Amino acid sequence: MSSTTETHFLDVPEHHEPHKGIRRWVFTTNHKDIGTLYLWLSFIMFLVGGAMAMCIRAELFKPGLQFFDPGFFNQLTTLHGLIMIFGAVMPGFVGLANWMLPLMVGAPDMALPRMNNWSFWILPFAFALLLSTLLMKGPAPDFGWTAYAPLSTTYGPKSTDFFIFSVHLMGISSIMGAINIIATILNCRAPSMTLMKMPIFVWTWLITAFLLIAVMPVLAGAVTMMLMDRHFGTSFFDAAGGGDPVMYQHIFWFFGHPEVYIMILPSFGIMSEIIPTFSRKKLFGYSSMVYATSSIAFLSFLVWAHHMFTTGLPVVGEIYFMLATMLIAVPTGVKVFNWVATMFRGALSFEAPMLFCVAFLIMFTMGGFSGLMLAMVPADYQYHDTYFVVAHFHYVLVPGAIFGIIAAVYYWLPKWTGHMYSETLAKFHFWLSAISINVLFFPMHFLGLAGMPRRVPDYALEFADFNRIASVGGFVFGASQLLFLYIVIKTIRGGTQAPAQVWEGAHGLEWTLSSPPPYHSFITPPNVH
Amino acid sequence: MKKSHKTLIYRLFIIVGLMFGFTFALVPIYNVFCDVTGLNGKVDTKKPGKFARYKNENASKSNRLIVLELDINHHQNIRCEFTSEKPALQVIPGELTHTTYHVKNLTDKKMVIQAIPSISPGFLAKHLKKLECFCFEQQTLEPFESRDLPLRFWLETAIPEDIHRMTLSYTLFDVTESKK
Amino acid sequence: MSPSRLSTLLFVLLWAISFPAGADYTFNMTPGITEISRGIHHLHMTIFWICVAIGTGVFGVMFYAIIWHRKSRGVTAAQFHESTVVEIIWTLIPFTILILMAIPAAQLLLKMHNTAESDLSIKIVGHQWYWEYEYLGEGVKIISRLATPQDQINNRDIKEPHYLREVDNPLVVPEKKKIRFLTTSNDVIHAWWMPALGIKRDAIPGFINEAWTNIDHTGTYRGQCAELCGALHGFMPIVLEVKTEAEYQTWLAAKKAENVKPTPKPIQSNTP
């Protein structure tokens, strides 16, 4: 390696040391600082969205209207969805990518550090904008996170424009983040790290980043059309002007289904890092994992209308979307089988990251099963827009995406902070979360099958019991995440010194650096075997 | 190892731009798709081109009768009387059929209306050919004005054999606001 | 006490607190009252048991590993990490299962879409926030609104058994007739859902959608709007009364006498 290469690696030569105080965070171009910012933003948003979920569960604790009027309830469900998806899950994964990708591919920093700073700092403003609608005169967005026309266009509250602008900002941020990630992975790898030697987390993020740049513009386009319908006299989604409200759903879900995989693929990567470490065995079927992830991403563009079976698609269309959707279960199944095969005949130990991974495996698979059931069009006529769907997507997203992020945080926290977290507290956190989450979401399957629609503030008496159970589970789950906050803060402030090789069975470049790693990760590209 | 980020970033931004454009391109694609598959029972409300002409497909050969229900909807309870001459028509496929709707402005204000057709089952939409329809353009009604609205159409003989009943539905929208 | 022991206790406690005694629960989808809805129920149970079987296999292997292949038992990890044959097998087997599942689903779907030869047509119009039913060709229109008093909703009065699932004018249909439902909307998108019939259809403004049913039993069945349609989305229930043909004709004649002249209602809509 010549010295010119090294200076090229350091894209911002003037910033070798961090600023002091708040300026460090505002002006930072360092991938670790930005990763930290992303992760904190994600956690704050998780608490905000969680607080909304607590309000929802409190209102649904028993039949009758308790605390909120129905209009405000709709605002809560809308903002809960938006905040959790765009505020908690996506920034959480981008934060992990920022922290870990340079460490894992052997680069000193992300490829485009200044853009990195920008893509983060857009987000707080986007969410401030979105949440400010709660304080405005008139309702906040109240049409569900899917924002179906014409409820969001002709009938949308004034604050809808804030929602649209906020979604634009989130989209710009995601696109910039994704471009940065692709550039880092494709251009900044250590020379000896070929594509098929990359850790699976890097692979899944590469694929996710391509999904992001492909579909975030579609969402931007959809909300732009919404804005034009609202203010500029077009009628994309208005039947009176020759448009079609169902077209909004097609465009939205063309974004929306890949979006689902954007929220789960990085988690698949995390599983593929953690399970081998604690099984003390190489990941089973590395290349089939890569192919499975790619085919999931590809198929995700071909199945969008399975969210819209009840809109009255032609029967041929429904059969096609049913088959395509079922097809996705194949590569997903391959991944699950590979993880189980990795564990099989390993030497397992169950530290907190591994516990969260096992819970992920079980509950994500259950969510996958209910997904398969939802794919059957005739049965979907009964499941659609009920609590069965709510149970399904919370089973894949909370133990999927959220547990993935939590597992990753426990896994890499000693590397980031240089301190070991408290294993006992972490185990408490795990058991509390894993049990309460099932108490929270499992009864929702029954509710949906028994006939309770989603997005209702009040319900018939026969749904009362399972709602009460779900609410109790919800409160416990919410409270246990405060324990997580405590554990993380405690670990940042002190604890046993963590060695460079934190976990006995871990492989990968990140473990060759000290804990915490130096401010600029790899000044000279490392060698990969 | 020295690679230019520039080329890569330009390419990625081009993808982003193309996808944004693609979203808008979806609108005409969707309309074509609707015409072909009859998705949603969406019917083209554009005037037929000057070459469009009723082709007598030898109607006498067809001894089928299809019941065409004429359904009417008042969007947002529009204050306009809107009725069809008959609740349903017996239509012979291939034969040019004529019927009349009647509309009356019930307010003391000028009103601009637009009727939007929809067909069920949706896949039959492509078999209904309109020669003349009030849905081709917006209608301006003076206060309390009433008007007869003609509809001339035919059903193609290609219509599937097992179809004996279909619905042509018109929804009347008040578009006075957007006209201003 | 170890975290796992404590958590078991917590689990038991949570269920004990939250499970009230003597209530009647519905766990599963209703088999319904039509051939189609029973078909759906059958499909639902089949795919459910297939999932249970696959799940038992996968989780069985996983728990076997979790119990027996622990480091604390002093095992050493095996070294295998790929096998093309195994990968191909576990790609093909799920694929085959899915194709086999898709066949009955597609057959049922085709049956559901066969709207030919119906005996009567009923148009369902979604409004913010009530349903309107029109018996096409009969000149009969009914408006069906929530009948639950506001006091019960606001917890000022005791809730009656059919709380939130009762209406002033139910939809009345005859049994053993092929009924065609056309759905549309007056404002935003609604969805008409009657679990007992296995029908859920979006009501879309400016468009009509179609579904059909043929009911076996008389009785009263309940459902509600299933697509978020604004503030009172949770308060627009559907009640279906299935009568014998003779009873239905009597009812229809009475209704016809009631509204001789069905004119468009001059009610001003709630403008957005």
Image (cartoon, helix red, strand yellow):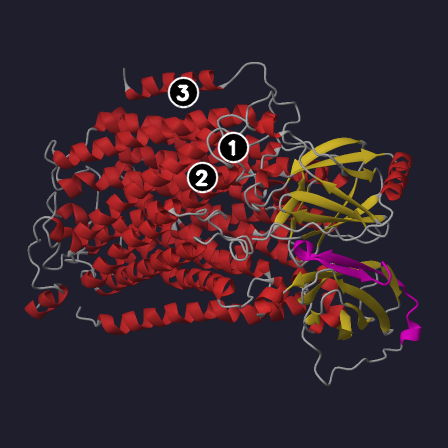
Measured Cα–Cα span from mark 1 to mark 3: 17 Å
Q: Residue A444 has which mark?
A: 1
Indicate the quadrant containing the C terminus of chain B: top left, top right, bottom left or bottom right.
bottom right
Three-letter amino acid code at the position of disc 3: Phe
Residue A61 place in picture, x, y as percent: 48, 26
At numbered mark 1, what does the secondary structure look like: helix, strand or loop? Answer: helix
Measured Cα–Cα span from mark 3 to mark 2: 20 Å
> In the image as oriented, which residue stretches furthest toward the front?
B108
Residue C272 place in picture, x, y as percent: 56, 53
> In the image as oriented, which residue stretches furthest toward the bottom?
B51
Chain bearing mark 2: A
Please say if C250 is above or below A31.
Answer: above
Please say if C45 is above or below A245.
Answer: above
Residue A272 in the figure: left or right of residue C85: left
Nearer to me, A491 or C95? A491
Q: Residue A394 has which mark?
A: 2
Residue C243 place in picture, x, y as percent: 84, 34
User: Residue at 31% across / 58% down in the picture?
Assistant: A173
Q: Is residue B64 magenta?
A: yes
Nearer to me, C144 or A203? C144
Three-letter amino acid code at the position of disc 1: Met
Indicate the quadrant containing the N terminus of chain B: top left, top right, bottom left or bottom right.
bottom left
At numbered mark 2, what does the secondary structure look like: helix, strand or loop? Answer: helix
Chain bearing mark 1: A
Neighbour tally class for label 3: few under 14, some 14-19, many 20 plus, Cα within 10 Å: some
